[in-house]
Amino acid sequence: MLTDANINLPPVIASSATSVDVKGLTREQLTEWVRQHGHKPYRAEQLFRWMHDKRVRTFDKMSNVPKNLQSSENARMGGLSLEKVMHSRDGTRKMILRRASGERIESVIIPMGADRFTQCVSSQVGCKMACAFCATARMPVRKNLDASEIVDQVYHARDVMEADGKSVNNLVYMGMGEPLDNFDNVVRSLNVLLDQKGAAFGSRRITVSTVGLAKRIHSFGEAVPVNLAVSLNATTNEQRAKLMPVNRAFPIERLMETLRNYPLSPRRRIYVEYVMLGGVNDTDADAARLPKLLEGVRAKINLIPFNPWPGSEFKSPANERVTYFLDKLMKAGIQTNVRQPKGRDIEAACGMLDGVQAPL
């Protein structure tokens, strides 16, 4: 695992004269910041527990933290304001959240049965990867979220679910944005969420999805021990380049070689996501090519029927095409799952997030 010294730390850590967003620091970084301000290291653990275990959002609620450590001249707590929670007929909840700078983002809480819920977390406002089938790519603003804004989505979701006597069990970084395009903030947010003195998520409970930024995949695997998901969505370079411009820089052959060499623990697999677009990538030939592409990759496949959004040029595949793909992949010995759409009626399903409130 990479230590904090191996990732780009916020430049404010080097200067005690600058206000720092303490909510976006790992416990180790927070300890260093506390020392720079002349306090004992145990104060860092107090701050960390208030922010990440008790989920306090203002310094005045921290009863055992010295006032001069709370001073706005030294520290601030970043995060998001919860603007609205939308409810789907199927039990999905979509949170509309707003940054201090005004941009909206969305995060989705998905029911998984038996009172279990998975949260889909965003890592950016918009996305510059320009995937043709994703509504987020249409957003005119493209900005990275800070680590504090990423973790705060999780804390807002916990507040929302605890009000109903429920909890969020798993996290997937599959919302707005490309996580590996916001590498440092994503890695820092994961280290915060995995910390057992804070949110205390298990590493097997978190999955991070990428469109296939091959140059960063291996480094990511060394940085944090969470699950990796990769969006493939095509079986030829020509087809994938049309759907996903990232393929021009990192074609399928390079991506597959990267996945074969990914630092994967013995009992884990890489999740390969395949968005099925009716009449585009759901042919018999695609079904035959897909297992061959994945030879040597320890993979599980998630088939994702396309979720239509307003203005999209694509359509959902016919049910028989999904069944055909599932049968072919299973017969090839590849563990395969079909992801059922959740939250379509509130534009919360995979590929539909665009920062605009859908009508109730």
Image: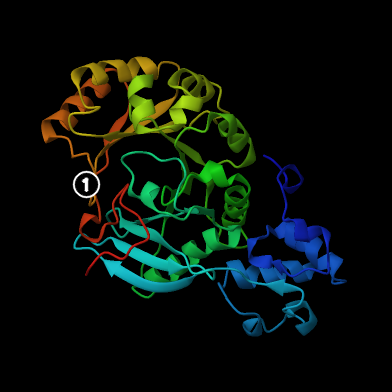
Q: Residue at 48%, 48% (x, y): give it.
A: 206
Q: Is residue 111 above or below residue 255?
A: below
Q: In the rendered view, does 208 fall on the left or right side of 70?
A: left
- Secondary structure under the numbered disc 1 in the rendered image: loop
Q: Is residue 24 visible?
A: yes
Mark 1: give few (<14), some (14-19) or many (20+) Cα within 10 Å: many
Q: In the rendered view, does 59 fall on the left or right side of 99?
A: right
Whole-percent x and y of residue 12? 76, 61
Q: Quadrant of the N terminus?
A: top right
Q: Residue at 55%, 27% (x, y): give it.
A: 262
- In this rendered view, identify the residue nearer to me: 44 or 313: 313
- In this rendered view, identify the residue nearer to me: 319 or 49: 319
Give the residue at the far front of this rendering.
140
- In this rendered view, identify the residue nearer to me: 98 or 137: 137
Q: How many marks?
A: 1
Q: Quadrant of the C terminus?
A: bottom left
Q: In the rendered view, does 348 fall on the left or right side of 258?
A: left
Whole-percent x and y of residue 229? 44, 37
Whole-percent x and y of residue 3? 72, 44
Q: Residue at 24%, 41% (x, y): give it.
A: 306
Q: Is residue 228 above or below residue 44?
A: above
Q: Residue at 79%, 81% (x, y): give it.
A: 68
Q: Is residue 269 visible?
A: no
Quarter-of-image position of residue 200: bottom right
Chosen colour scheme: rainbow
Mark 1 belongs to which amino acid? Pro
Quarter-of-image position of residue 333: top left
Disc 1 marks which residue? 308
Whole-percent x and y of residue 219? 62, 34
Give the residue at the far right of this rendering.
38
